[in-house]
Amino acid sequence: MDEIWTLARGVRLRTLQAGRGAKLALFWPGTGLPAEEFLDLAGRLQATGFRTILVEPPGHGESAPWSGVWHFTDARDILEELIRPHGHPPILLVGHSLGGTTMLAAHPGLANVRGLVLVDGGLPLPAPYKTYAAAARDLEDWIRDNTYPDWEAWVRSARADLHHWDALVEAGVRGAMRQTKSGIVPAIDPPSVSAMLYCLSGYDPSQLAESAVPTLLLRGTEVPEPRALDALRARLRGLVVESIRGAGHELVWDAPDAVADRVLAFAGALDWT
Protein backbone atom coordinates (compact mmCIF):
# COMPACT_ATOMS: atom_id res chain seq x y z
CA MET A 1 0.00 0.00 0.00
CA ASP A 2 1.26 3.48 -0.85
CA GLU A 3 0.52 6.29 1.58
CA ILE A 4 -0.70 9.17 -0.59
CA TRP A 5 -1.66 12.58 0.74
CA THR A 6 -4.24 14.49 -1.25
CA LEU A 7 -6.05 17.80 -1.01
CA ALA A 8 -9.84 17.39 -1.23
CA ARG A 9 -12.35 20.12 -0.42
CA GLY A 10 -9.38 22.09 0.89
CA VAL A 11 -8.56 19.42 3.51
CA ARG A 12 -5.30 17.46 3.49
CA LEU A 13 -6.28 13.81 3.64
CA ARG A 14 -4.24 10.66 4.14
CA THR A 15 -5.13 7.78 1.84
CA LEU A 16 -3.72 4.31 1.26
CA GLN A 17 -3.70 3.30 -2.39
CA ALA A 18 -2.65 0.23 -4.36
CA GLY A 19 -3.48 -1.82 -7.43
CA ARG A 20 -3.60 -1.08 -11.14
CA GLY A 21 -6.89 -2.63 -12.19
CA ALA A 22 -9.57 -1.03 -14.36
CA LYS A 23 -12.10 -1.24 -11.51
CA LEU A 24 -11.88 1.14 -8.55
CA ALA A 25 -12.89 0.31 -4.96
CA LEU A 26 -13.12 3.13 -2.42
CA PHE A 27 -13.29 2.49 1.33
CA TRP A 28 -14.61 4.76 4.10
CA PRO A 29 -13.95 3.47 7.66
CA GLY A 30 -16.18 3.53 10.71
CA THR A 31 -16.36 6.43 13.13
CA GLY A 32 -12.99 7.14 14.71
CA LEU A 33 -11.17 4.46 12.71
CA PRO A 34 -8.21 4.93 10.35
CA ALA A 35 -7.82 3.89 6.73
CA GLU A 36 -6.10 0.71 7.94
CA GLU A 37 -9.45 -0.78 8.95
CA PHE A 38 -9.87 -2.14 5.42
CA LEU A 39 -6.30 -3.31 4.71
CA ASP A 40 -7.19 -7.01 4.54
CA LEU A 41 -10.31 -6.63 2.38
CA ALA A 42 -8.62 -4.16 0.04
CA GLY A 43 -5.72 -6.55 -0.50
CA ARG A 44 -8.10 -9.34 -1.47
CA LEU A 45 -9.94 -7.11 -3.93
CA GLN A 46 -6.63 -6.01 -5.48
CA ALA A 47 -5.89 -9.64 -6.22
CA THR A 48 -9.07 -9.77 -8.35
CA GLY A 49 -8.19 -6.74 -10.48
CA PHE A 50 -9.22 -3.74 -8.38
CA ARG A 51 -7.41 -0.50 -7.82
CA THR A 52 -8.15 0.52 -4.22
CA ILE A 53 -8.29 3.79 -2.31
CA LEU A 54 -8.66 3.66 1.48
CA VAL A 55 -9.83 7.04 2.75
CA GLU A 56 -8.87 8.49 6.11
CA PRO A 57 -11.78 10.92 6.64
CA PRO A 58 -11.30 14.48 7.87
CA GLY A 59 -10.55 14.58 11.58
CA HIS A 60 -9.59 10.89 11.65
CA GLY A 61 -6.09 9.52 12.17
CA GLU A 62 -3.56 11.79 10.50
CA SER A 63 -5.97 13.57 8.14
CA ALA A 64 -6.56 17.26 8.77
CA PRO A 65 -9.67 18.37 10.67
CA TRP A 66 -12.91 19.47 9.08
CA SER A 67 -14.08 23.00 9.81
CA GLY A 68 -17.76 23.73 10.33
CA VAL A 69 -20.94 21.83 9.54
CA TRP A 70 -20.66 18.43 7.85
CA HIS A 71 -23.09 17.06 5.26
CA PHE A 72 -23.02 13.82 3.30
CA THR A 73 -22.61 15.99 0.20
CA ASP A 74 -19.19 16.97 1.57
CA ALA A 75 -18.21 13.30 1.52
CA ARG A 76 -19.52 13.01 -2.04
CA ASP A 77 -17.36 15.96 -3.11
CA ILE A 78 -14.30 14.44 -1.43
CA LEU A 79 -14.90 11.13 -3.18
CA GLU A 80 -15.30 12.89 -6.53
CA GLU A 81 -11.94 14.58 -6.08
CA LEU A 82 -10.28 11.27 -5.20
CA ILE A 83 -11.82 9.58 -8.25
CA ARG A 84 -11.07 12.35 -10.77
CA PRO A 85 -7.34 11.53 -11.34
CA HIS A 86 -8.35 8.00 -12.37
CA GLY A 87 -10.79 9.05 -15.09
CA HIS A 88 -14.24 7.49 -14.94
CA PRO A 89 -13.71 3.87 -13.89
CA PRO A 90 -16.52 1.59 -12.71
CA ILE A 91 -16.68 1.93 -8.93
CA LEU A 92 -17.37 -0.19 -5.87
CA LEU A 93 -18.04 1.78 -2.66
CA VAL A 94 -17.38 0.11 0.69
CA GLY A 95 -18.08 1.64 4.10
CA HIS A 96 -18.36 0.53 7.71
CA SER A 97 -20.92 1.90 10.20
CA LEU A 98 -21.13 5.68 9.69
CA GLY A 99 -18.77 5.11 6.75
CA GLY A 100 -21.38 2.83 5.18
CA THR A 101 -24.11 5.41 5.68
CA THR A 102 -21.78 8.02 4.19
CA MET A 103 -21.21 5.93 1.06
CA LEU A 104 -24.92 5.17 0.73
CA ALA A 105 -25.94 8.83 1.05
CA ALA A 106 -23.15 10.04 -1.26
CA HIS A 107 -23.47 7.49 -4.09
CA PRO A 108 -26.37 9.10 -6.04
CA GLY A 109 -24.08 12.04 -6.87
CA LEU A 110 -21.22 9.87 -8.15
CA ALA A 111 -20.92 8.56 -11.69
CA ASN A 112 -20.42 4.91 -12.59
CA VAL A 113 -21.10 3.33 -9.19
CA ARG A 114 -21.67 -0.38 -9.89
CA GLY A 115 -22.09 -1.62 -6.33
CA LEU A 116 -22.29 -0.67 -2.65
CA VAL A 117 -21.08 -2.66 0.35
CA LEU A 118 -22.42 -1.52 3.73
CA VAL A 119 -20.66 -3.16 6.67
CA ASP A 120 -23.28 -2.71 9.39
CA GLY A 121 -23.98 0.71 7.93
CA GLY A 122 -26.78 2.56 6.20
CA LEU A 123 -28.86 2.64 9.37
CA PRO A 124 -29.80 5.60 11.62
CA LEU A 125 -28.63 6.18 15.16
CA PRO A 126 -30.84 4.37 17.71
CA ALA A 127 -31.11 7.63 19.68
CA PRO A 128 -30.37 10.64 17.42
CA TYR A 129 -28.77 13.74 18.91
CA LYS A 130 -31.11 16.74 19.12
CA THR A 131 -28.23 19.22 19.00
CA TYR A 132 -24.60 19.40 17.95
CA ALA A 133 -23.70 20.05 21.59
CA ALA A 134 -25.31 16.75 22.62
CA ALA A 135 -23.23 14.87 20.04
CA ALA A 136 -20.09 16.65 21.24
CA ARG A 137 -20.79 15.79 24.90
CA ASP A 138 -21.37 12.14 24.05
CA LEU A 139 -18.12 12.06 22.10
CA GLU A 140 -16.24 13.59 25.03
CA ASP A 141 -17.57 10.81 27.27
CA TRP A 142 -16.52 8.19 24.72
CA ILE A 143 -12.99 9.64 24.50
CA ARG A 144 -12.71 9.61 28.28
CA ASP A 145 -13.86 5.98 28.41
CA ASN A 146 -11.33 5.06 25.72
CA THR A 147 -8.22 6.64 27.21
CA TYR A 148 -5.53 4.20 28.35
CA PRO A 149 -2.28 4.65 30.31
CA ASP A 150 -0.09 2.89 27.72
CA TRP A 151 -0.14 0.89 24.48
CA GLU A 152 -0.13 -2.44 26.27
CA ALA A 153 -3.35 -1.58 28.11
CA TRP A 154 -4.99 -0.39 24.92
CA VAL A 155 -4.07 -3.48 22.88
CA ARG A 156 -5.20 -5.74 25.72
CA SER A 157 -8.60 -4.01 25.75
CA ALA A 158 -8.93 -4.12 21.96
CA ARG A 159 -8.10 -7.81 21.80
CA ALA A 160 -10.74 -8.60 24.41
CA ASP A 161 -13.40 -6.99 22.19
CA LEU A 162 -12.46 -8.81 18.97
CA HIS A 163 -12.80 -12.43 17.93
CA HIS A 164 -9.92 -12.29 15.45
CA TRP A 165 -6.42 -10.86 15.85
CA ASP A 166 -3.47 -10.67 13.47
CA ALA A 167 -0.90 -8.12 12.26
CA LEU A 168 -3.41 -6.32 10.02
CA VAL A 169 -5.94 -5.97 12.83
CA GLU A 170 -3.24 -4.67 15.16
CA ALA A 171 -2.19 -2.09 12.54
CA GLY A 172 -5.79 -0.95 12.35
CA VAL A 173 -6.44 -0.64 16.08
CA ARG A 174 -3.11 1.12 16.65
CA GLY A 175 -3.96 3.55 13.86
CA ALA A 176 -7.15 4.43 15.73
CA MET A 177 -5.17 5.77 18.71
CA ARG A 178 -2.35 8.19 19.43
CA GLN A 179 -0.04 8.83 22.35
CA THR A 180 -0.41 12.07 24.30
CA LYS A 181 0.63 13.38 27.72
CA SER A 182 -2.75 12.13 28.98
CA GLY A 183 -2.09 8.61 27.69
CA ILE A 184 -3.29 6.68 24.66
CA VAL A 185 -6.36 8.43 23.26
CA PRO A 186 -8.52 8.09 20.12
CA ALA A 187 -6.80 9.64 17.10
CA ILE A 188 -9.64 11.96 16.17
CA ASP A 189 -10.42 15.65 16.04
CA PRO A 190 -13.51 15.94 18.30
CA PRO A 191 -15.22 18.84 16.47
CA SER A 192 -14.88 17.02 13.13
CA VAL A 193 -16.32 13.76 14.42
CA SER A 194 -19.05 15.55 16.39
CA ALA A 195 -20.15 17.26 13.17
CA MET A 196 -20.33 13.88 11.42
CA LEU A 197 -22.33 12.31 14.24
CA TYR A 198 -24.73 15.24 14.28
CA CYS A 199 -25.14 14.87 10.50
CA LEU A 200 -26.04 11.22 11.06
CA SER A 201 -28.73 12.32 13.50
CA GLY A 202 -30.65 13.82 10.59
CA TYR A 203 -30.37 10.69 8.45
CA ASP A 204 -33.63 8.85 7.75
CA PRO A 205 -33.48 5.83 5.40
CA SER A 206 -37.15 6.27 4.51
CA GLN A 207 -36.21 9.58 2.86
CA LEU A 208 -33.50 8.10 0.64
CA ALA A 209 -34.00 8.39 -3.09
CA GLU A 210 -34.86 5.00 -4.53
CA SER A 211 -31.80 3.23 -5.89
CA ALA A 212 -31.32 0.20 -8.10
CA VAL A 213 -27.56 0.01 -7.46
CA PRO A 214 -26.79 -3.51 -6.20
CA THR A 215 -26.14 -3.20 -2.46
CA LEU A 216 -24.77 -5.72 0.02
CA LEU A 217 -25.48 -5.10 3.70
CA LEU A 218 -23.37 -7.26 6.01
CA ARG A 219 -24.44 -7.58 9.64
CA GLY A 220 -23.15 -9.56 12.60
CA THR A 221 -25.40 -12.00 14.38
CA GLU A 222 -24.44 -10.37 17.69
CA VAL A 223 -26.04 -7.09 16.56
CA PRO A 224 -29.84 -6.82 16.98
CA GLU A 225 -31.80 -6.26 13.77
CA PRO A 226 -33.16 -2.69 13.75
CA ARG A 227 -36.65 -1.72 12.64
CA ALA A 228 -35.12 0.72 10.15
CA LEU A 229 -33.97 -2.20 8.04
CA ASP A 230 -37.47 -2.39 6.54
CA ALA A 231 -37.23 1.23 5.41
CA LEU A 232 -33.84 0.50 3.85
CA ARG A 233 -35.24 -2.48 1.96
CA ALA A 234 -38.07 -0.31 0.65
CA ARG A 235 -35.69 2.27 -0.85
CA LEU A 236 -32.90 0.02 -2.17
CA ARG A 237 -34.28 -2.26 -4.86
CA GLY A 238 -31.00 -4.12 -5.21
CA LEU A 239 -30.43 -4.73 -1.49
CA VAL A 240 -29.13 -8.07 -0.24
CA VAL A 241 -28.72 -8.55 3.52
CA GLU A 242 -26.35 -11.23 4.82
CA SER A 243 -25.47 -12.10 8.41
CA ILE A 244 -22.08 -13.31 9.58
CA ARG A 245 -22.32 -15.73 12.46
CA GLY A 246 -20.60 -14.75 15.69
CA ALA A 247 -19.50 -11.31 14.51
CA GLY A 248 -20.31 -8.02 16.22
CA HIS A 249 -20.30 -4.48 14.90
CA GLU A 250 -16.59 -4.71 13.97
CA LEU A 251 -17.25 -7.31 11.27
CA VAL A 252 -14.17 -6.50 9.22
CA TRP A 253 -11.93 -7.42 12.15
CA ASP A 254 -14.14 -10.05 13.83
CA ALA A 255 -14.58 -12.21 10.73
CA PRO A 256 -12.25 -11.02 7.92
CA ASP A 257 -12.44 -14.25 5.91
CA ALA A 258 -16.23 -14.38 5.97
CA VAL A 259 -16.49 -10.69 5.06
CA ALA A 260 -14.01 -11.09 2.21
CA ASP A 261 -15.78 -14.17 0.84
CA ARG A 262 -19.10 -12.37 0.68
CA VAL A 263 -17.70 -9.14 -0.75
CA LEU A 264 -15.69 -10.96 -3.41
CA ALA A 265 -18.70 -13.02 -4.43
CA PHE A 266 -20.87 -9.88 -4.56
CA ALA A 267 -18.30 -7.90 -6.58
CA GLY A 268 -17.76 -10.85 -8.92
CA ALA A 269 -21.43 -10.87 -9.86
CA LEU A 270 -21.61 -7.15 -10.74
CA ASP A 271 -21.60 -5.76 -14.27
CA TRP A 272 -18.18 -4.17 -14.83
CA THR A 273 -18.51 -3.57 -18.58
Image (cartoon, grey):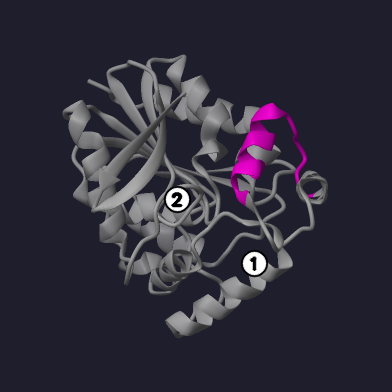
- Please report whichever mark, 2 or 1, sits nearer to the chain's N-terminal start: 2
Q: Is residue 170 magenta?
A: yes
Residue type beneath disc 1: Ile
Structural distance between the alpha carbons of marks 2 and 1: 22 Å
Res 137 → quadrant = bottom right
Circle on res. 72: none
Residue type beneath disc 2: Gly
Give x and y (percent) for residue 182.
70, 63
Name the one closer to the observer, 129 or 1.
Answer: 1
Residue 123 appears left or right of 185? left
Res 247 → quadrant = top right
Give x and y (percent) for residue 158.
75, 48
| Region rendered in magenta | 161-177
Confirm or deny contact between disc 2 and disc 1 (CB under 8 A).
no
Name the one closer to the observer, 35 or 198.
Answer: 35
Residue furthest front as drawn: 181
Name the one closer to the observer, 229 or 148.
Answer: 148
Give x and y (percent) for residue 86.
21, 27
Residue at numbered disc 1:
143
Residue at numbered disc 2:
100
Taking the spot 53% from the left edge, 35% from the top edge, the residue there is 38
